[in-house]
Amino acid sequence: MRRAVLLLLVLLIPLGLALIPTETQEAIPWGGVTLGEIPKPPVPREPAFFGGTLVCPLPSDPVEMSPFTRATTWSFYFFYPIYDSLVGIDDQSRPVPWLAEYWESTPDGLVWTVRLVKNATWHDGTPFTAHDVAFTFNHVLEVKYPRWSDLWETVEKVEVVDDYTIKIYLKFPYPDFVTDVLTFPIVPKHIWEKVVTAPDFDPFTYRATDEVLKVGNGPWIFEEYVPGQYIKYKANPNIFKGRPFADELLMPIITSPDAGILALRKGEVDQWYWRLSPEALPTLLQDPNIRIHLYLSPYVCHWGFNTWKFPLNIKEFRKALAHCVDKDYVVETIMHGYGRPGRFGVWPITGLFEDWANPDPKCGVYGYEFNLTKAAEILDKLGFKDIDGDGFREGPNGEEIDLELAPPTYDPIRVRIAEMLAEEWLAKIPGGGIKAHVVYQEWKTLWPRIKLPPDDPNKPDTWFLCSSYGTRPSPDIMRFRLHSSKIPNPNYYGFINATFDELAEEQARTVDVERRKEIAKEMQAILAEELPFISIFHRYGISAYRVDKWIGWVPGIMWSVNNGWSWWNCVLREKAVLKPMTLTLAEYPPPKVTPGQTITIKVSLTDPEGEPITGASVEMHIAGIPEVFKFEEIETGVYSITLSTEGWVEQPYTAKIISSAPGFEEAATVLTFELTKKVAPVTFWGAYGPLIVGILIVILIVIAVYAFYAARKKSPSK
Amino acid sequence: MSAIFFLARATGDPFAEIIEQDPRVPPEAVQRLRQRWGLDKPIYLQYIDFMKAMLSGDFGYSVAYYAPVFEIIKQKLPWTLFLLSTSIVLSTIGAVLLGAYTAWRRGSRFDLIATNTSLFIRAIPHFWLGMVLLLVFGFYIPLFPLYGATTPGAHYSNAFEFIKDVLAHAALPLTCLVMRQIGMYMLYMRSATLEVLGEDFIVTAKAKGLTDREVLFRHAVRNSLLPMVTITALRFGFMVNGAILTETVFSYPGTGRLIYEAIMNSDYFLLQGAFFITSVCVLIANLIADLLYAYLDPRVRVG
């Protein structure tokens, strides 16, 4: 009897629990993402400020001519002005609501409800509705375009609730849904329906015609494209967020970076960013109307190892190699400072999404500091010793070691790193170096070799590669590149770690941001411990733009000024009624500065009436130093900075000081100084000595030649 | 034809790049792309497909541009043809005149200067010459535009304006090409003329009391033109390939860059199409050269 009651109870308890009303499934506003801000224009968006043609060149023709197949950067640029997306990405790489007014997700992250703005229209006047969104998504789900895999791999189905609300059902919780899926461009149903149902429509080879391109929903209306020459757009007067200030956007195609820079200096184009090398900066900085913007590229340039091959299969051996890379030398000397050292935790890029980075110093930039003695200790412990006395270590069983270092020949930076490793760092380990040789191979030859399976004898032992780790704060990129199922491409390293795989799979389904950060940090710790490769550096991208014609450029942390926000916000400088600002250098360094000397620069800012301007932002760019120096306001209208030249290279420096304040035009000034030890007072011999010695030498040579000929003439000829 | 097929395939895998650029593209999707272009088939079947297509004049679809190959080449061909044919005509005339004259006045100061200058220009890298021209005549003395074949976004009220714009844009690339080509072909012409000048009939012509000019142009130049005809015809034949470096430096919309990018992208079909058109053009040019030979040199006609 008692037993029966107990049994009944046991059966009833779960039933009862099921009957108790559970916590109502409350939707998560914005799906839990942190929103960014739409960059603000310098003046209100009013007709008085409209006008002008903004000239933003492209270095190449757009390649793919359909928003669905677009893959190259140039095609992205081509379609970007025409088709808008539900969500935009701001200059800080955060999502901002655009055609979507609001979105929310269920707590499990499986169903997303997106509310659209009601006042958006297509360029032909047709209202923009949820049907367009559903059409675009369904078309991608049906065709499964390779570049849209984020969408068709995650989305189960799309449901139109009403004209301005749409429900998206996912196959599994996808934490990057907002930045990866909602950012796709939306195409008009009433135009594209005819396109995709045409009997000869082939999704992979379709090239949008002019008539199709003329109906978009973006801030710009496509006007014409002349292959090899230019693309032209005109401002869309009816865009829901307000029209761009410029009347026209012109993208001439300039295929040579040298011509591009000349055109920028001449004022024929308004910005240039493609292949702008640090060498061009001193000239560009000298022009007071040109501004420089540095941004971080998402590429992790690393030294990759084939972790299946002796001796690279030994973890401790790889750690010894990690102690042999002088990242500071790479960044300061080889790259002239225009880069940042990489982290041992690989992701995120140094200086970006820092809240996702594991604070453990081991995962940081100097996790394994440059220390050849430490490398020697590890190698000694492993039994790698120089047995035959040739200066290089052999394996524990006397195996010959000769590592192949394979950089692609097109990149002088990576070639130089490989050479430094082979000739200096690896060779000079105390007690015997590690023998290594650089293999100079052209990219087309090297690249297929890197992609070989790790057990293929033709795979290089080590290589130097730059791989993109994405522009969003998503650790999923580590899964895409390093999960063991991705061997050999893109997991070229043959990296296998069961814990890492589990964590990688877990983070891909974790909607809770804080939990995801924890997992990401654990993944970084594993990478820093296992070292399938060593992240050496990240490059700085450089873009330059003119401010004498247009103001309102939006430089992004991860992109150049050539972007949709800049096109939308740029105002003709003559139209934007701003008060001029006078920048006066109150204190500046002498033309010659001794290394290590501290220099102080003081500027004062005044308005046309001579009143000081407070609250301005004053910054300085110095060619050769990729850092922006911010001035501090020390008294009303006077701004100052003090910096030490300790550790600077002895060379001439060009510095540009730029001040900006709300309601005022920017002011800029250029100053040059030289860092040199030779600042001794000028003496007679110091100034004229070399000249006098030179003249003497010339006179002596003339006399000698003359004497020689005279002697020959006198001697009897044979 | 077979060489075209295998050369194009030696440039690598066109779809491997996709994964490198974006590792999130799933392999199945890449496989579907391969299928779409018939690149998943064994190589002998691809070869049969290729032969069939070429015989029917169908060049297929470009892998990178997702568009018919001929259409893409057609977009850029007129500019290349304009730029190169003008430069070939101008440089041939220049080279013939200069070459003949320097040969006639062999050893003179003029010969020395002209020969050395042409050797010097020949040694200058193409793109460097272009960059210097741009810097001097495009930037410091802004006589000519810095890029393109026409002013972007311009609308012309009459044909004359259009021609003026095109000529202004073509001026610098043309100068660059013509300078270099004169430097190259003047030496050919000079040595050909020198050979002819040593022949007996020149002595006869001189003995007849003809003026120098008559001897040079009526007797020497005509005979030394024969090798130039072959060279010029071949240059016309290879014209479709464009001039990669000049086009890049001056941002000129031509086929040279297109073909270079096709190699970098391993765009088999575009390469096959371009090579095919080139080989047809070279064949035609050779034919024309042979016909011209018959006209210029009676000996060939008899044989």
Image: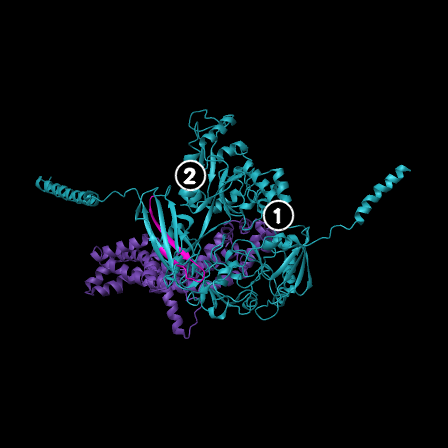
Identify the mark nearer the N-term, 1 or 2: 2
Residue drawn at x 37%, y 41% as measured from the top left:
A646
Q: Where are the magenta residues, as a range? A: A650-669
Give the numbered dot on residue A419.
2
| Chain of the residue on which disc 1 is drawn | A
- Within the image, what quadrant is residue A205 found in? bottom right
Per the image, the residue denoted by label 1 is A513
Q: Quadrant of the C terminus of chain A?
A: top left
In the rendered image of the structure, the colour used to display chain A is cyan
Q: For numbered disc 1, what is the local secondary structure?
A: helix
- Residue toward you, A561 or A154: A561
Residues tagged by mark 1 and mark 2 found on one chain of the structure = yes
Q: In the rendered structure, which amino acid carries the disc numbered 1?
A: Val
Q: Main secondary structure of the magenta part?
A: strand
- Chain B, which colour? purple
Name above or below for residue A98 compared with residue A414: below
Instruction: Mark 1 vs mark 2: give the one in front.
Output: 1
Where does residue A413 sit, x and y in percent of width and height? 43, 44
| Residue B287 inside the magenta-drawn segment | no
* x and y percentages locating residue A611 in the rendered image: 38, 61
Q: Quadrant of the N terminus of chain A?
A: top right
